[in-house]
Amino acid sequence: MKPSNSQTIDKESICILGIPFDANSSFKRGPALAPSRIRESYFCESSNLWTEQGVDLGTLKGLYDVGDVDCCNTSATFETITRKVTTLLKKDARLICLGGDHSITFPIIKAFAKEYKTLNILHLDAHPDLYDSLDNNPFSHACPFARIMEKKLASRLVQAGIRTINGHQREQADRLGVEIMEMKEGNGWLNELQFDGPVYLSIDMDCLDPAFAPGVSHHEPGGFTTRQVLDIIHRVKGNLIGGDIVEYNPDRDINSMTAMTAAKLLKEMIARIFTDRLSES
Ligand code: MN
Ligand code: MN
């Protein structure tokens, strides 16, 4: 993962973009600090740059860190995100964004939907994030998937890891045609799940059980093991073309353990995107 100037980015590229933005958090701030901490853990010498799938990210050509989106002006940040993501996708690059709170997925998907006529989203989270509005904020981190589905930016939204759904969000899911695999149903769905066409993977770190990922704002017991999330990244059927890792909160972390977990998920996601693209051509 080398720094890049924009000229080097082309259809062979996989780009990592930081979005240090947490102004739409409802409970605790902190995820704005995440991108730099995840990068640190990615390069931490306690591990190496080979993935479980046998890809050496240390020598992988076209893997670029394209820096952070400027999030200083809160009210302009969503537009800045959509513009930056659009620029990278226009160069046919693959893209993984590091949040930030989960509100950033809406402006990211706005850009993806322009480039991909059919777009499937697989969303791993303790929460469905389908509120019509939370704390009078329709762009809260609790709302992005309501906005995405209302604007018909995804042909299919499948959520897994869910264990906090309430009456309002269940109504929203029915109204918006969201497919939900609740945590109580187990992981058997993974073998059945198949996507036609491009898949965007949005990972909220609180999809993991707090025992595995304490560095999140919302500790919701009963979540995925790290192994289960890795299995999903490796095995989900479809063509993975991009994604995000959001809601890591360094203020709540213990010995950077959750940063290491986020970095590992990032590594495996890069390798999956790389191998899916190879099998495309
Ligand atoms: Mn979320
Ligand atoms: Mn969540």
Image (tube, grey):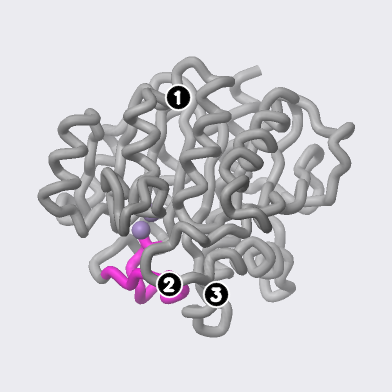
Residue 119, label in figure: 1
- Provide the residue span drawn in magenta: 206-220
- Indicate whether 262 appears above or below 106: below
User: What residue is drawn where x is 33% and y is 72%?
Assistant: 219
Lower position in the chain sequence, tag 3 or tag 2: 2
**Residue 77 % position (x, y):** 61, 47
- Indicate whether 193 appears above or below 119: below
**Residue 136 % position (x, y):** 32, 54
Q: Which residue is mark 2?
A: 28
Seen in the image, is 24 located left or right of residue 175?
Answer: right
Between circles 1 and 2, the one closer to the viewer is: 2
Seen in the image, is 105 located left or right of residue 187?
Answer: right
Q: Name the foreground residue: 255 vs 154.
A: 154
Q: Amino acid at mark 1?
A: Leu
Lower position in the chain sequence, tag 1 or tag 2: 2
Q: CA distance from mark 3 to mark 2?
A: 11 Å
User: What residue is drawn where x is 81% and y is 32%?
Assistant: 9
Q: Look at the numbered disc 1 and give the secondary structure of its residue.
A: loop
